[in-house]
Amino acid sequence: MKNKEINLPPVPAVLLAIISVQCGAAIAKTLFPAIGAAGTASLRIGISALILLLAYRPNLKTITPTQWKIVIPYGLSLGAMNLIFYLAIERIPIGLAVTLEFVGPLLLAIAGSKRLIDYCWVLLAAIGILLIAPWTNDRLDPLGILFALLAGAFWTAYIVLGGKISKIMNGGQAVSTGMLFAAILILPFGFLENGLTNLTPKFFGMGVALALLSSAIPFTLEMKALGQLPPRTFSILMSLEPAAASICAFIFLQEKLNFYEILAVVCVVIASTGSTLTAKR
């Protein structure tokens, strides 16, 4: 029986991926104290790789040299992005980490634009990000800030490489092969931190849910969208991440949004919707 591809329009696919990631973040937060950042990243990516390899069963022998040259760095950038971001939120608030991480895709959006309207959407998204960031925190870890910015650089690489590989390789095959290399990169860090030695059946079950919500489902959806959306449009759509994080925190953790956070949500939603409506085909 052949595997069925997820068939969603690109914009709903990205939005569903964002919601999935933020639900997974709630699970990751409960795992951090027990198995650490690297252990949580290893569990998430390792299980995700197994799920995707079983689901898509990529034939590595049929991958061409041209495809290998893109899918390997795609997978490594995916793995590095997740590991370094988890290291960042160990040291600084997640809202600030998400905001700083988005600097990478935001710069990509600006670099790829030649129309005034695109700059307007990017500026509006940037205003929303500035409003939602907890800049008043006086006890910021410089290493945490550096990790968040570095994660943003790998996020940018993931967007660019994902767009390229989606045009020359089947989406499911690409994301499952890429996740394999992401796991190869991350797993040693999980063992070095000794986080994986603290695994229990309960934590493993939570890891499966985390892998599905934070990696397997969203990365597959994003791969599908990257093949149909310009990298600039995809980047601005991903500006919903900080707003989605705040909304999920309200739903799952009963954290209320203040006026500036609500204003930030409005800014990024308008920017994301506007960029989608005005994007060139």
Image: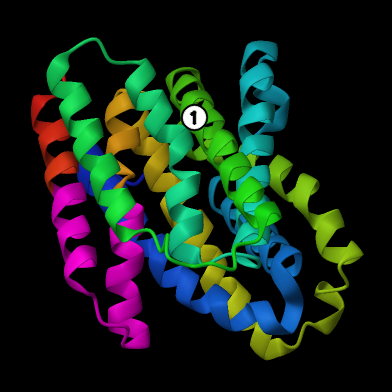
Residue occupying image coordinates x 62% and y 74%: 207
Residue nearest the observer in this picture, 64 or 192: 192
122 horizontally vs 40: left or right: left
Judge whether residue 92 is colored magenta.
Answer: no
User: From which residue to which does the magenta span run?
Assistant: 240-269
Coordinates of residue 4 in the picture (x, y in percent): 38, 46
At 34% from the left and 15% from the top, the residue drawn is: 112
Name the residue nearer the viewer: 154 or 117.
Answer: 117
Where is residue 77? Give x, y as percent.
64, 36
Q: Residue at x 50, y 46 (%)?
A: 101
Q: Nearer the viewer, residue 257 or 62?
A: 257
Q: Position of residue 192 (x, y in %)?
A: 91, 63
On the image, the x and y values in percent for residue 69 come to 68, 17
Q: Which amino acid, mark 1?
A: Gly
Magenta stretch, main secondary structure class:
helix
- Judge whether 199 appears above or below 15 on screen: below
Decide: is 66 above or below 169.
above
Q: Residue 189 versus residue 177: which sits nearer the camera?
A: 189
Q: Residues within 10 Å of mark 1 (few under 14, many from 20)?
A: many
| 65 over 51 or under it: above or below | above
Instruction: Report the quarter where the C terminus lies.
Output: top left
Lateral position of residue 62 relative to residue 236, left or right: right
Q: Is residue 36 visible?
A: yes
